[in-house]
Image (tube, grey):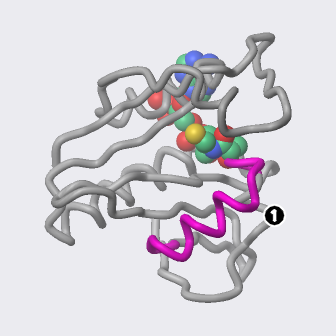
Amino acid sequence: MKTKRIKEAYPMDLLLLADPSRKLIEQYIQRGECYIAEKNSETIGVYVLLPTRPKTVELVNIAVAEQYQGKGIGKALVLDAIEKAKQQGYKLIEVGTGNSSIGQLALYQKCGFRITGVDKDFFTIHYEEEIVENGIICVDMIRLARQL
Ligand code: COA
């Protein structure tokens, strides 16, 4: 998957699919690098690489436009993020997702991430609205990481 880095005109509609908090998204895109995938000049995918600690980067705000989901684009974006992080000399890539995000947990593990921990009550603390997915209330953040 070919992606390109952008420094303006961020696809907010797509970014909001991955994270309902506009405030958090704005912080992430300021501190990180935003990459997009396009098809016929339409933005169909996005992710942000956020440096967190020395040699460590976090994959945040990954999203695929709804009509393009389930076609392998999300997986290609995760693999692209891994490649970019490697090229930039990072040694570890991390990602976090909700306890209710079953598909995302599958996707990250299929891309070589392993669960490293649980950030308990992350979603109850940081989000005002209750999040429910797959009939499960989202309360904890599952942390995953992959060596590069
Ligand atoms: N059980 C097992 N595997 C599952 C699954 C489930 N319930 N749901 C998804 N998967 C697997 C798919 O089978 C696929 O693996 P495969 O290639 O081995 O078949 C993999 O996960 C990803 O599929 P893909 O088509 O590449 O995903 P996508 O293009 O739909 O993108 C998201 C995935 C999450 C980026 C996309 O659905 C999205 O934008 N969601 C909304 C935003 C979001 O939740 N972002 C993540 C925040 S943590």
Residue 32 x %, y % = 45, 71
Q: Give the magenta range.
A: 17-34
Percent across and percent down for residue 8 are: 63, 88
Residue at position x 59%, y 27% from top? Answer: 98
Instruction: Please give left or right for residue 66 compared with residue 57 in the image.
Output: right
Name which residue type carries label 1.
Answer: Asp
Looking at the picture, how far across and down is residue 142, in whole percent? 47, 25
Which one is nearer the viewer's eye here, 122 or 4? Answer: 122
Q: Is residue 130 left or right of residue 73?
A: right
Crowd band around label 1 with a 10 angstrom C-alpha radius: few (<14), some (14–19), many (20+): few
Q: Is residue 136 magenta?
A: no
Q: Residue at x 59, y 54 (%)?
A: 61
Q: Is residue 131 above or below residue 7?
A: above
Q: From this view, report whether residue 129 is shown above or below residue 66.
A: above
Reply above or below: 49 against 96.
below
From the viewer's perspective, is 1 left or right of 53?
right
Residue 20 on the magenta segment: yes
Residue holding disc 1: 13
From the viewer's side, name the closer residue of 19 and 70.
Answer: 19
Q: Quadrant of residue 53?
A: bottom left
Q: Residue at x 77, y 48 (%)?
A: 20
Which structural element holds mark 1? Answer: helix
Q: Quadrant of ligand 1?
A: top right
**Hey, which residue is sitting farthest bottom in the picture?**
8
Residue 105: x and y in percent read: 50, 25
Residue 93's place in the image compared with 112, above or below, is: below
44 left or right, relative to 87:
right
Query: Principal SS element in the magenta part?
Result: helix
Q: Residue furthest front?
A: 125
